[in-house]
Amino acid sequence: MAEPIIRVQNLTFAYNAQSENPIVALRDINLDIYPGDYLVIVGHNGSGKSTLAKNFNALLTPTEGDVWVAGMNTKARENTLAIRSTVGMVFQIPDNQIVATVVEEDVAFGPENLGVPREEIIERVKWALDIVDMQAERLRAPHLLSAGQKQRVAIAGVIAMRPKVIVLDEATAYLDPVGREDVLRAVRKLNQDGVTVVAITHFMHEAAEGDRVLVLEKSRVVMQGTPREVFGRVEELRELQLDVPQTTDLAYRIHKRLPEFPSDLLMVPEVVDTISEFALRKGVPA
Amino acid sequence: MEDFEFLRNVTVGQYLPSDSLVHRLDPRTKITVLLLMVSAITFNVSYTANIILLIVSFAYVVLADVPVGYILRGVKPAIPFIIFMSAMQLLFYGGQFVPPNMPSVTLIKWSIVHVTTGSVQLVIISTLRFLQLMFLASLLTNTTTITKLTHGMESMMRPLARFGFPAHELSLVATIALRFVPIFGEQLEIVMKSQASRGAEIAAKGKLQFVQTARQVAVLVVPLFIDAFRRAEDLILAMGSRCYVGGKGRSHMIQLHFKPVDIVAMALNLVFAVVMLVFRNSFPL
Amino acid sequence: MTVGEPIITVNDLRHTYLRGSPLEVEALKGVNLEVYRGEALGIIGRTGAGKSTTVQHFNGLIRPREKGKVIVFGQDMADPNIDVRGIRQKVGLVFQYPEAQLFERLVGDDVAFGPRKMGLSQAEISERVRWAMNSVGLPFEEFKDRFTFSLSGGEMRKAAIAGVLALRPEVMVLDESTSGLDPRGRKDVLSLIRKGHDEENLTIVFISTNMDDLATLVDRIYVIHDGRTVLSGATREVFAQPEVLRGYGLGVPQITEVMHGLKGRGLPVDERCVSVSQAEEQVWKILSS
């Protein structure tokens, strides 16, 4: 088994740790993220998910415990640049990540900061814009783009640094359904190319994209597993006041009345198939 | 009726696209030419020199394919101010200004009013200078995109970076500021509409409301400030995540290259400026 | 429940931003809609379709200057002499991300802004503020002296909504009031809107791109696409056309997709179903036969 690309050991984080009123955002978190993973972290605002994300690229460092990125400890200042070029981060608000007045120049910002030679920057910018499908807009002024397009530019700007991991901190929160789908498509492509993805979200149907889901509540991990496993626990999710996909909700309700009916269905096609199957057994349609 | 739309597309120094000779020049050339011309203008106070400078500035505008009417329309709001300043200069500066090439003759002297041929010259020269500078400034901003301008300025300041001068940092400050101008324009529009929806009186377009209570201003300014600070916080995180640590060690994707026409333009201007400066006191009139 | 004549009528409305400049944008190309007293109406469409532009005509922020008519409470909005302040008291408009308008130090003061501008007495202002804050779930005594900018995102949004509610309008227009909120925040805002409609008889116009919000909140929907009204009808009827909606860049609730799929397999279900409970009943009827 390969080494984890991000290892979190007994991570506890408190804001204003030295003051009289520290706010503990994370308690004793343990987590291993392996290369190529697609991990989704869900939870309410205030659950600690954003704090956890910022510990992955040394924007925050642990109050107690350790975070290792590709073997480097985030607490060591000398590792910061290397860590941030290994773990790229995309934030919620598209406008507040774009610094340049021309799309392709913003995408070049990261590589320029790393001192990448000019020829290579040009190549990387082209490659990054292709992946997010924004090549056609490369000379446009960012303020003329839609939110979804801006977010894709932000993603391009991050991947142009060729990070091994990309963390999306609620990157779809301010997008409309089409914008969200465009972003998810780009992220899927990246994951298929081997980039590790950590997506923070409170949209349940996005959690279905990952191969693992982590549920955070009030600074602790309260559930983990595959999307199917986690969503199957409908009662617990309800108690946490988290959304359950309507598909899983329906499957669960039928399961309660009919135990043979599987409760851990996620996608629309499989729900339709399963119900049809059961209906056929009852002779419907006749 | 109120009109909130004027904020929607705020840009600085409107760029007028064209394929003129001047448009195709390197931004550094244009900045250099501007600096040279400004030096020549600053030290030339004779009538002859200023006519020459006006003709040359005008020639640039023509070369740049910029409609003169467009530039002059930009002067309109300043006209009351110019008239006021000119009157002040005409009436009270007679004793202060001595033209280098000829003696100053007193025309009117009465109490503090002192009109001389010198003050007349001052007024005329000031007006000519104003026009020259309008033409030259417009040349820069109408023919060069802001992006190119910041690249040009950064490139020119870069040699100073060796001595610790924050060339890249300054140019990044300029770029980010420009990038957010339309965003704050939109944000202002939204806040104005929001407050108007709650019953606030928002000034109609065109009406100059100088007298506003602190509260009326706060209604608009406070949300904008808060918004600006939030964005700044976010930007800091984003830039840090993208490994920004200042200008040192950065590479550059955009490279500016001088073409022969740039060298010629700068050389000609240099000669012109030097001549104007060397002979500034020798012009008749 | 809709009664009588519409209180807002929009007829073939056009609007161009920055008309005459090289940057002009034709935002509305012919919008038609009606709002009836007491109803809960939904407006959906992709970002940039023209939804916000349309509703900004309801309270006179934008006036019809080209073709088209907008009549609000009997007033022709193209007439420069109408009492705009009066209209703005009757039609409350809550913008997207309304927390961006907060400016007072204390929450109570900010909510009081609207009533103060209306020239009410101090006693009336306090009463309005108390009612508005309690209605949105920010208890008056607890929150009135809190610092505005110390509230959480969801709380700030509620405070902004309270600020408009305090005008005691007859119509509340809410532009994407759930966007950017987490599931708990969304539920809170949706339930306070529902309460406003059910208990206070407020006419609600709700703009969203989120299908799930609309499914359970509104009775009627207009779909706006590329500056035009392209579809309208009862919620169930509109959601019964997922392919058409997809063509406009919109989706339907997952549950509606499921029911459509089942109908396609020949099962006797009503594919216009929009809630999980309804779906459960129908499927169970089949599986328990």
Image: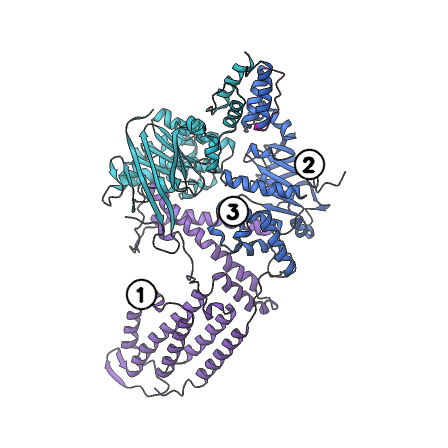
Say which mark, if any, is on residue B76: 1
Say which mark, if any, is on residue A31: 2
Q: Residue at x 61, y 57 (%)?
A: A122
Highlighted magenta segment, given as a residue range = A258-268
Q: Nearer the viewer, residue A50 or C277?
A: C277
Which residue is tagged 3? Answer: A149
Q: Amino acid at mark 2?
A: Leu
User: Chain B, which colour?
Assistant: purple
Q: Is the residue at mark 1 from the same chain as the one at mark 2? A: no
Can you tell which of label 1 and label 3 is closer to the viewer? 3
Q: Amino acid at mark 3?
A: Gln
Residue C211 in the image: state x and y as whole percent: 47, 32
Q: Amino acid at mark 1?
A: Lys
Q: Is residue A259 magenta?
A: yes
- Neighbor class of circle 2 (other Cα within 10 Å; few <14, some 14-19, many 20+) is some
Dot 1 falls on a residue whose secondary structure is helix
Among the chains pictured, the one given cyan colouring is C
Q: Chain of mark 3?
A: A
Q: Earlier in the sequence, mark 2 or mark 3?
A: 2
